[in-house]
Amino acid sequence: MKKITALILAMLIVISCAAPALAFTDVNDADTATAAEVLRLMGVIDGYPDGSFKPNNSLKRSEFCKMAIFAKGVSDKASGYQMVTIFPDVKPSQWFAPYVNMAAKSEGMISGYPDGSFKPENTIKVGEAVAILMRAVGYTDSSKFPIWPDSYLTEAKSIGMLDGTGLSVSDGKRDITRAEAAKLFVAMLKLGKLSAYNLGKDDATLSSVDASAATVTLSGGTTLDMAKSFSNTTLIGSKGKVLTDSDGKFVTILPEGSTGSGITNAAVIVAQNGSTAGFSTLSDGNSYKIYKNGKEIGSSDIKKYDVATYSSNSRSIVLCDTRISVYYEGCDPNPDSPSTVTVLNGTQLTVLESARNDIAKYKPGDVMTIMLTANGQVAGVTDASAKNMAIVGSDGKVKLFLGNALMDTNAVSLDHAGELVSVSSYKKDAVSLNEYTNSTADFDPVRRIMGDEKLSSSARIFYNGSEIASSDLGKSIVNGDDIHYARRDADGNIDLMIIPATKITKIIYGKARYDSESRALTITNGDGSVTHNTTYLVNSQDYVAAKEVTTKLRHFDYDEETVLFTEVESLAQMKNVKKSAFSGKSMITFGGASYVIPDDVQCYNKDSQSWVTLDQALAYSDTFTCYSSGGNTVRIIEVSR
């Protein structure tokens, strides 16, 4: 059977050549990665639909105004400024109107050009960006700033607003990049001059995130509600000042020193259970705590083959136990000294310098089991068995767990949507997924218990491939049969729960008609026609087998049902099959092999262009073209004269 190549609707994250950021796909610099993550938790930025941040792109004046309104913590009032007219080139119908108008009228952050315009589509300059944020923290235009924009930049430097940004006083008239803007916003937040927030006086470490309860835990066991719900963050383990809103809810954390996570590019592979050998070298002799799967652990929970890295910001050793068997697709620059390797349908991974000799023992085309760090770099190759987990989104995109973080891959499988799986690849363009399942008791989302087991404070719940809070499940008991997997932590509490959507699957056989523009596939047979969308490229008029999957999603007040063709295959053709090859109506012998004819076999008369019964097909001609699926079963019989 010929497999039709899947059309990937959206390419997933490709890990970059430097230490990769797991929140955004294209951020190589640790300082930029963490600054962007700080702002993501605040809702200041979301990135692009493809998961990228585009750090080197410039910003429009309108875009920067929106960011400033959100960063200042006043975005909830912006809608009241939609219909206000201040600038002739900012119309009420434009998306940015409320933010620009609010920034000008109530916040005093912008004033426009001498001709009265704002020029929202113009790129914003470094000097303009700095001036807006200086006004955001209370500065006003005065004789203190006689020279534009140098005076603003000089004052910004003197109060620390340029610290860690890489910007200088002489940069005022050039465009600011998105990366520089992110670091500039973080520097502004560290000044502690925004009335909407309270900046903690003492440093704290972000220990864990409980997405199901919408809380975070800080060092010392302090628990705070989230101001804005988020499911996970690469800032776990970071030490710095905590930013809270007026209600005392957690907004974000501002890592101390550099805005980077501080994770080193060195790793230690644990040689035996409980061993901390090499950890002191990683930490450069500093004291440290040990984290695994987002939770602080003792040495008894350290296992052989765990990969340890050190975060200087949080002064912690971070362990990752992800091992994955992969087909070696390619490398850069060469197999003798690879700085990156390509695996899993084009996913590019950075190779630590200490691991390059290990990788050099292999070449593209080989299969190897690689060990990954908590930030997605290759730490070595092992003979140990693979061990990994991945969550498959409702769109089929496969995300690999790296401790408590998720890393996107280029693997896609709609057949496993919503499931927790193990991942492996033993040949080119073929990724194998196997679902993790176990028996569970019913779950009470209100009491946060499963049977007599409690949900841990850092538990993560995935429903149909997306992370949710336990409160999102409503107040009704979730049947244990609907929960495919539950994992226990070292304390015996549930720390991971997987609830896929309900799926009903059946195979449909017939003649294909494919609309490439709408991606709609219609399959016609003697029972009629069925049309659904698909991600597969299909040749019209081919005879195919298509897997029809109906997914049922449960919501609070309604049920949602979607139907897709998740897998489409061309049927294998057998030409010039003689009537003498038939054994009654149940079997065909052809080419030395036997093929079963099922009761629901479909028959098509090519001359009349109509679907007919098997008896009618056998009576019409002595020669047939038969189409079979796997397992030597005839699915379609075509007849003509």
Image (cartoon, rainbow, N blue to C red):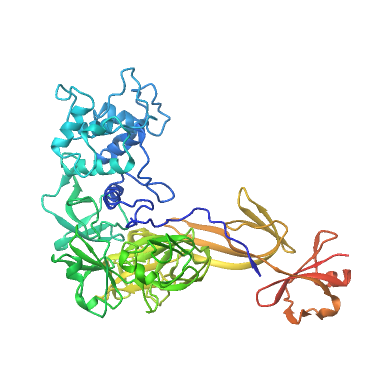
Is 180 above or below relative to 15?
Answer: above
Q: Looking at the rendering, which quadrant does residue 62 occupy? A: top left
Is 527 above or below relative to 254?
Answer: below
Q: Looking at the rendering, which quadrant does residue 377 occupy? A: bottom left
Quarter of the figure that contains the N terminus = bottom right
Q: Position of residue 35 (x, y in %)?
A: 27, 48
Is 380 positioned to the left or the right of 50 in the image?
left
Residue nearest the viewer, comparing 309 with 8 = 309
Q: Looking at the rendering, which quadrant does residue 458 occupy? A: bottom left
Residue that appears at 43% across and 48% down: 49
Is 258 positioned to the left or the right of 621 in the image?
left
Q: Position of residue 566 (x, y in %)?
A: 57, 62
Q: How many numbered badges does the structure rendering display?
A: 0
Residue that appears at 25% across and 44% down: 183
Residue that appears at 72% across and 79% down: 596
Is residue 435 visible to us here? no
Residue nearest the viewer, comparing 556 with 495 = 495
The extreme front residue here reads 336
Quarter of the figure that contains the C terminus = bottom right
Q: Position of residue 59 (x, y in %)?
A: 35, 36
Residue that appears at 25% across and 58% down: 215
Q: Position of residue 67 (x, y in %)?
A: 31, 39
Is 96 above or below relative to 535?
Answer: above
Is 390 above or below relative to 585?
Answer: above
Residue nearest the viewer, comparing 366 with 549 = 366
The extreme left residue here reads 201
Is residue 396 visible to us here? yes
Is 157 positioned to the left or the right of 351 in the image?
left
